Image: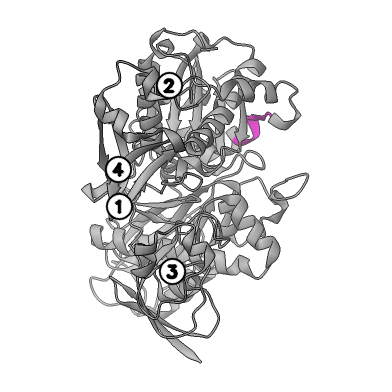
Amino acid sequence: MIAKVTFLPDGKSAEVADGPSIIDASIRAGVRLIAPCNGKGTCGKCGVQFQEGAPAVADFDARFYSQPELDEGWRLACMHSVREHAVIFAAPATLGKVDFGPSLDGITLSPNVRKVYVPLRTLRGETFTWPDLQANASGALEEPPTLAALRRLDQLRYAPGMELTVVVRGGQAIALEEGDTRLETYGLALDIGTTTVAASLMDLNTGEELARHSALNRQLAHGSDVMSRLTSLDADRALLPVLQRLVMETVAELLEHVLAAAHARRDRIYEVTVAGNSCMHHIFLGIDPLSLAFAPYDARVLGAIEARAGDLGLDLEPETAVYALPLVASFIGGDALGATLAVGLHRSPSIKCLVDIGTNGEIVLGSRDRIIACSTPAGPAFEGASISCGMIASEGAIYRVEVGDDVSFETVAGAKPRGLAGSGLIDLCAGLRRVGLINAQGKYVAPGKLPALGAPLRQRMLEAKKKFLVARSYGKSLWLTQRDVRELQLAKGVIFAGIEALRTEMGISTDEIAELHLAGTFGSYLDVGNARTIGLVPQLALERIRAVGNAAMVGAKMCLLSCDARREAEGLARRIEHVELPTRKDFQDLFMEAMAFPAAGDEDAGLERAR
């Protein structure tokens, strides 16, 4: 039987044979659903509401929805198969604000692409040769042509007043364009993240960013983190081209946005630079990443990779050049390298620390004298996957929380609250820690033991079940449970322990860290004071802690605009020393200690680390 599944509110539909899951049908329809648990039915975050054709309620549905919600048609999309025609409401997963990182001030332009304008004045006949072209360029065109450029030359016939523009890339003349197209010389910088993909359209003549856009990675239907996707690949090797196609579809969506915003032509993009973590880097290039999943956990390749858009399925001219930033180590990717390049850590006379927060935290510490780095498996808490009311920072996500006499919050796009984003989770736990409702061990404190606690906060605490009411919306209550607090402790503890391990390896005190940069799209909403309060970062003075947003994107832009920056990045990748945390005897002790929240008030005590 062929069944038609229609998804609201977009009205997109897919016709599928009997059997695939609702998630699979959504992918075919081009609807973005998120399945953090990769179809295991354990997270409850892929809920959809059937308007027609609802399947029978199953036990896994009842674990996440009340009887009234089940009666209204709410089901888990990952666990139900298509059996008949259906109309389904699926809340759109639209991304919130993404900080595209620090500015590019001071970069010297030396792009790999330039254009040579050739007004044809002196020719010996109707057809012309490459030497004729060089003669008319008055010495500005010395590079040899590619075969494609020569064949294009064969097709041209001279006309009075004819003008040509020669596209030169990497020491070769690669294309001929009629007219003067020098002002249309574009490049595309990409940051391929596990959750978010970002694109910047750049003018290679001026270094100006013409347009930017970001979107959720369409691979999210196959899990919220790297390990989920690797697990899926291990079970089905045929999934690799599917995952690659999904990320290319995400990039194609971004391309449509940036080209429209800049009123630019697709065929005027001549080069693409790509930064991404090791797994996303491999999948983008169509390289099997399973070597990352099993001992000795090696990447297939570390150095910079150059490819053609046509070989990758990228929605650009087939000959468009693609440059993937090198990796540092198995789980220290081109994103961390790009961010390191962007903040100038390798040029700094004083010691700086860079923390790229995500499901796999990447930490870099050092100066111009020495740089070391490690990766930490922070898990999906910051992306909301392991938090009962957690979600990605998309529309309706609570991204900022203040705890005073009561709880106040802000949501992405000002929408009704649907869940708690990672930054909101940090704010909330920091606030509850300050008022005493959470102790240093991360356990809830009975309101009766806090005589100064006001009635509004007391009423939010359900002491019997050890959970705190964050908000009510859409007929549901969003609770922060004791387990949620523990998940945050695990995530922040492993990152802090990673920082401490590098600090110990470097042989420095906390006070010797001149600056700490918090990078990643997660940092777009992060309150650094609250990050310090919960012990995500060391107890440095606040003016020394900076949220720098998507610094990896800045590194990708730098490598797009400057060949010197590429060489610098490649040298930096070889120079950074990889510290393997699992081999350190002290790491488990550091981690156990780092799980505790700093003692109340210690976040304002200066530079001493809270014990």
Q: Amino acid at mark 1?
A: Glu
- Quarter of the view holding residue 289: bottom right
Which residue is outermost to the right? 295
Q: Is residue 231 magenta?
A: no
Residue type pointed to by label 2: Arg
Q: Residues within 10 Å of mark 4 (few under 14, many from 20)?
A: many
Mark 4 or 2, closer to the camera: 4
Check if mark 2's residue and mark 1's residue have beta carbons within 8 Å. no
Tag 2 or tag 4, which sits nearer the N-term? 4
- Marks 1/3: CA–CA distance: 34 Å
Res. 452 image quadrant: top left
Q: Residue 446 at what x, y percent from top left?
A: 42, 24
Residue with the mark numbered 3: 317
* Magenta segment: 573-579
Observer-side mark, 1 or 4, equals: 4
**Residue plotted at (44% across, 41% down):** 562
Secondary structure beneath disc 4? strand
**What residue is disc 1 on?**
395
Residue 580, percent from left and from top: 70, 31
Q: Which mark is residue 471?
A: 4
Q: Which residue is denoted by mark 2 in the rendering?
A: 532
